[in-house]
Amino acid sequence: MIVVGNLKTYMTYKDIIEYKDNIPDDVIVCPTSLYIPYFLNHKYEIGIQDISCHDLGAHTGDICALQAKEFGIKYALIGHSERRNKETDDEINKKILKSLENNLKVILCVGENKGEDLKSKLQYQLLNDLKGVTNLDNVIIAYEPIWCIGTGVTPTNLQIEDTINFIQTIIQTNFKGNAKILYGGSVDKNNINTLKQIDNIAGFLIGKASTDYKYLKEIVDSLR
Ligand code: 13P
């Protein structure tokens, strides 16, 4: 199973000193970009929490896909709900295309807010964000319902399984290749044994619970 830790902006430099040397080998870690150099040269793989929709050029504050790839970063997390209010689906689409062009794998986050129609929201995001992607083999899709992020609430296994089936139907009908599908939102060591029983799940995208390496190791161990 794939385990991705999204460290968001949770940790200081002091926090990462011990953390970076104690993460399980077989995870993908997405640190705050500033700290990525300290996470390189370990066995685990590195993802960046966002990527520019531009190439090299005059784009203050951006990190472009070529720069990330050159630095040893393997994945770009794109379209996280904590960023989606600052960007359009068109920009998300450009970020995905730029990443794939530069051989960065993509982790695309999709998900609905409370009160939104799940299926139409996911269909809109998938069709628009992945427009022009010829093959999904290097794309991971993370289903993250917004109402479950940082809330301690998760959907039922059956709800997640249905949603993953729905995502699979959309991508099989509209795209070539196979995208693995993860679940994210309040995953922790207490619910992982329940969530891992979901039939069609390829792994988990974990926020807060991934910022403690002991806690992360417990989660990873329960999946092995
Ligand atoms: P939490 O695990 O803290 O709910 O965050 C989920 C998330 O947003 C991962 O990208």
Image (tube, helix red, strand yellow):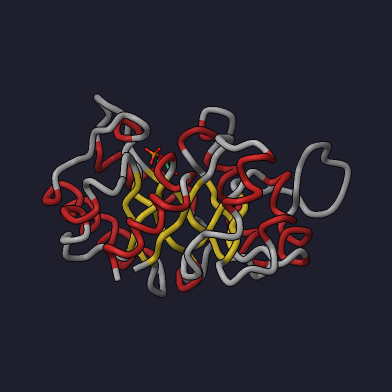
Q: Position of residue 37 (x, y in %)?
A: 74, 56
Q: Quadrant of the C terminus?
A: bottom left
For the point 56% across and 65% down, the residue is: 105
Report the residue at 47% width, 64% height from top.
24
Taking the image as shown, residue 50 lies to the left or right of residue 145, namely right
Identify the residue shown where x is 44% and y is 62%: 140
Q: Quadrant of residue 169?
A: bottom left
Viewer-side residue, 101 vs 19: 19
Query: Could you say where residue 207 lies in the image, as x and y percent from the top left?
Result: 43, 43
Count the marks.
Answer: 0
Q: Is residue 22 above or below residue 12?
A: below
Among the 4 quarters of the image, the one containing residue 201: bottom left
On screen, 148 above or below 26? above
Residue ranking furthest to the top: 115
User: In the displayed structure, does residue 17 sit left or right of residue 130?
Assistant: right
Relative image position of residue 102 (x, y in whole percent):
69, 67
Q: Quadrant of the N terminus?
A: bottom left
Q: Which of the 4 image quadrants contains residue 69?
A: bottom right
Name the foreground residue: 99 vs 192. 192
Please state which of residues 132 and 82 is positioned toward the viewer in this rendering: 82
Q: Report whether 219 appears left or right of 214.
A: left
Report the residue that reaches farthest toward the left: 158
Residue 85 in the image, given as x and y percentages of width and height: 52, 28
**Rendered-image quarter of ligand 1:** top left
